[in-house]
Image (tube, rainbow, N blue to C red):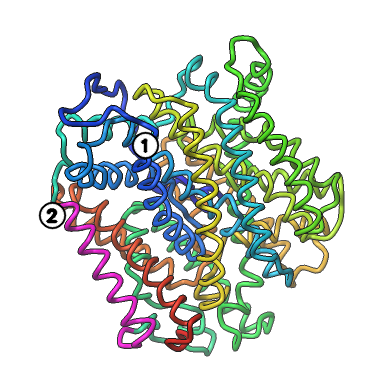
């Protein structure tokens, strides 16, 4: 997962391996077409991207994580185009496969670009509603700005400096290997992927519709005189959450469990004893208070991480921006320039009409888009992490400082930058793969533009269906939305109006998060818990974190027993479980909307 809740919205949970000196194929596979920008590559990319978008909406609302999808899109694209080629004109070329994954990745990133995993649910939690058409057009304009920013930065970061962009290198290496052999290695992975998806779909139906499988098995015992289940303790029967643990790794998952234990075993019972929280409200009641130390941990970690890289990232980003006007840089082309101008003007209009943003607020956010896209692009290039939420939060702080006003306006201003940088990072991973495979950057940009439009049209209805069916809360905790909401509150109102002792808890969380992040930079890196994951564990219901931790433990034990089998099939098993539950969750929501079944729960 290349993009988590703070991007990671983004911690990158399972970053693709860094592969150096990819062995690129210079001649086409026998029987392959030599085309690149073909109808089948675009249609295939949009179809695969729609699957990624559905998965990212569902997984992002539940866990705060989303996946760029470059690797899985390359595998599915090659397999689909190869099967289609048996009946239509031969197998795909490497460039065609790359264009398919480029389009798919652009589509799959749109839930994050649109703010569906952060700013939009944050506004809903504040009692503000945004029309569906407004979200669709808003997301498309921000996606276009992100694609254009990536294209502007591409030449300096890839051609001149040759930054690593490890996910892009891994994607190029995979595509090369697929076309060298003419088939997907270890074809059993396809059966594992399909079998895992079908099993998960069936289990989700039996759990959410038939109620034959419990959603959660509550923990026994009592805390503060109340059943342990009051504090969301237990095991959730969600294959998707277990798959997230399998793919996130043991350290990240156990860090989440630690955060959940601190939140729900140490703090929540004390809040109940003191009467600071109405325990009858369950998760919704406790989360109002627990959100503050959890977000404090994540913000503390983000500040230290950005500060450590600030000098190199900001200095280099400034050089990137100055280089855009040099004669050595390729121009965007008149049509692309006018597209960028039109998207900026449309952002100003939509900001006013849809969100009520004054023009000066939106102008400030737009002025920060390209500089912060450059910072984010370097993060993706050097560390393979696209710090999406941090860039949005910096914009919130700047907006709240320069233009104090309602918190809703602050969240909307932050979403401008967060949306654009989300697409910029994903686009540059694709450009890196294309750079190594000698793909046409202009054709990649056109496919990304198409992906932005398709992703906006797919993601927003999926989000609205899921939220209408399951509701924001314990079923869909949306941890990234709490970050937007709290940063807006502090930026505008300071510490006034917080729950009792919440400000102190947030401060403690901030310093603990900063300390853990500093400690992780030394020899203790593998032993120190992840502050971001701990904060995420504090925001989620405890049974979410426990289930994720269980998945990580199971795959760790299995790897000790059968390492070859786990390494060969675990990615497909996890991807199938995530996709299967996401697709069935959407299907159930659609059936509820059509009044064919009753609402779950």
What secondary structure do most residues of the magenta stretch adopt? helix
Question: What percent of the width, then of the height, locates residue 430?
Answer: 43, 34
Q: Which residue is mark 2?
A: 561
Task: Count the marks.
Answer: 2
Q: Mark 1 falls on what kind of element? A: loop
Q: Residue at x 60, y 46 (%)?
A: 514
Residue ID for mark 1:
38
User: In the image, is residue 227 above or below residue 468?
Assistant: below
Between the C-alphas of marks 1 and 2, the distance is 45 Å
Taking depth in this image into account, of 160 and 252 the one nearest to the observer is 160
Q: Magenta span has 237?
A: no
Which quadrant of the figure has residue 463?
Answer: bottom right
Q: Which residues are magenta?
A: 188-213
Give above or below for 221 relative to 117.
below
Residue 273 position, x and y percent, is 62, 84
> Does residue 387 appear left or right of residue 76 in this picture?
right
- Please give the name of the residue rendered at 56% of the width and 69% of the height, measured from the top-left corner: 464
Q: Position of residue 180 (x, y in %)?
A: 18, 29
Disc marking residue 284: none
305 and 513: which one is in front? Answer: 305
Q: Residue furthest top?
A: 327
User: Which quadrant would residue 369 be assigned to in this image?
Assistant: top right
């Amino acid at each position: 997962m290349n993009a988590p809740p703070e991007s990671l919205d983004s911690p990158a949970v399972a970053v693709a391996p860094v592969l150096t000196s990819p062995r690129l194929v210079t001649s086409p596979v026998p029987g392959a077409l030599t085309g690149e920008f073909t109808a089948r590559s675009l249609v295939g990319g949009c179809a695969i991207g729609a699957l990624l978008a559905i998965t990212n909406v569902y997984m992002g609302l539940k866990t705060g994580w989303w996946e760029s999808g470059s690797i899985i899109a390359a595998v599915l694209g090659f397999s689909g185009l190869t099967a289609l080629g048996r009946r239509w004109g031969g197998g795909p070329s490497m460039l065609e496969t790359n264009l398919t994954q480029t389009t798919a990745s652009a589509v799959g990133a749109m839930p994050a670009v649109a703010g569906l995993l952060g700013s939009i649910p944050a506004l809903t939690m504040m009692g503000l509603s945004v029309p569906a058409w407004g979200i669709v057009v808003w997301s498309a304009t921000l996606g276009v700005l992100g694609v254009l920013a990536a294209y502007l930065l591409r030449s300096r970061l890839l051609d001149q400096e040759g930054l690593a962009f490890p996910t892009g290198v891994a994607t190029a290496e995979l595509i090369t290997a697929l076309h060298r052999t003419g088939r997907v290695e270890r074809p059993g992975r396809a059966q594992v992927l399909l079998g895992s998806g079908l099993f998960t779909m069936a289990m989700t139906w039996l759990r959410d519709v038939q109620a034959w499988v419990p959603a959660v098995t509550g923990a026994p015992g009592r805390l503060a005189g109340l059943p342990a289940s009051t504090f969301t303790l237990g095991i959730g029967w969600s294959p998707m959450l277990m798959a997230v643990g399998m793919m996130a790794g043991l350290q990240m998952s156990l860090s989440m469990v630690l955060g959940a234990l601190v939140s729900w075993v140490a703090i929540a019972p004390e809040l109940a004893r003191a009467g600071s929280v109405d325990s009858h409200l369950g998760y919704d009641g406790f989360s109002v208070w627990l959100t503050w130390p959890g977000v404090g941990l994540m913000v503390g970690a983000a500040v230290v991480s950005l500060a450590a890289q600030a000098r190199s990232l900001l200095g280099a980003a400034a050089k990137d921006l100055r280089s855009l006007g040099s004669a050595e840089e390729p121009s965007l082309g008149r049509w692309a320039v006018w597209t960028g101008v039109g998207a900026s003007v449309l952002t100003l209009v939509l900001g006013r009409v849809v969100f009520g943003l004054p023009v000066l607020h939106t102008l400030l956010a737009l002025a920060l888009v390209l500089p912060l896209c450059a910072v984010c692009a370097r993060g993706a290039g050097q560390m393979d992490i696209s710090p999406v939420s941090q860039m949005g939060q910096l914009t919130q702080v700047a907006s709240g400082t320069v233009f104090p006003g309602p918190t809703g306006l602050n969240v909307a201003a932050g979403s401008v930058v967060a949306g654009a940088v989300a697409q910029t990072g994903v686009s540059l991973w694709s450009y890196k793969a294309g750079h190594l495979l000698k793909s046409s950057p202009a054709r990649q940009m056109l496919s990304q533009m198409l992906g932005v439009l398709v992703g906006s049209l797919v993601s927003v209805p999926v989000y609205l269906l899921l939220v209408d069916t399951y509701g924001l809360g314990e079923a869909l905790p949306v941890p990234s939305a709490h970050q937007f909401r709290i940063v807006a509150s502090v930026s505008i109102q300071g510490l006034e109006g917080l729950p009792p002792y919440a400000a102190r808890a947030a401060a403690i969380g901030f310093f603990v998060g900063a300390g853990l992040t500093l400690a992780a930079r030394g020899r203790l890196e593998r032993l120190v818990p992840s502050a971001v994951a701990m904060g995420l564990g504090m925001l989620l219901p405890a049974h979410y974190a426990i289930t994720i931790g269980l998945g990580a433990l199971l795959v760790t034990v299995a790897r000790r027993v059968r390492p070859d089998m786990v390494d060969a099939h675990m990615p497909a098993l996890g991807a199938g479980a995530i996709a299967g539950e996401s697709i069935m969750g959407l299907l159930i929501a659609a059936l509820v909307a059509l009044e064919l079944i009753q609402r779950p729960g």
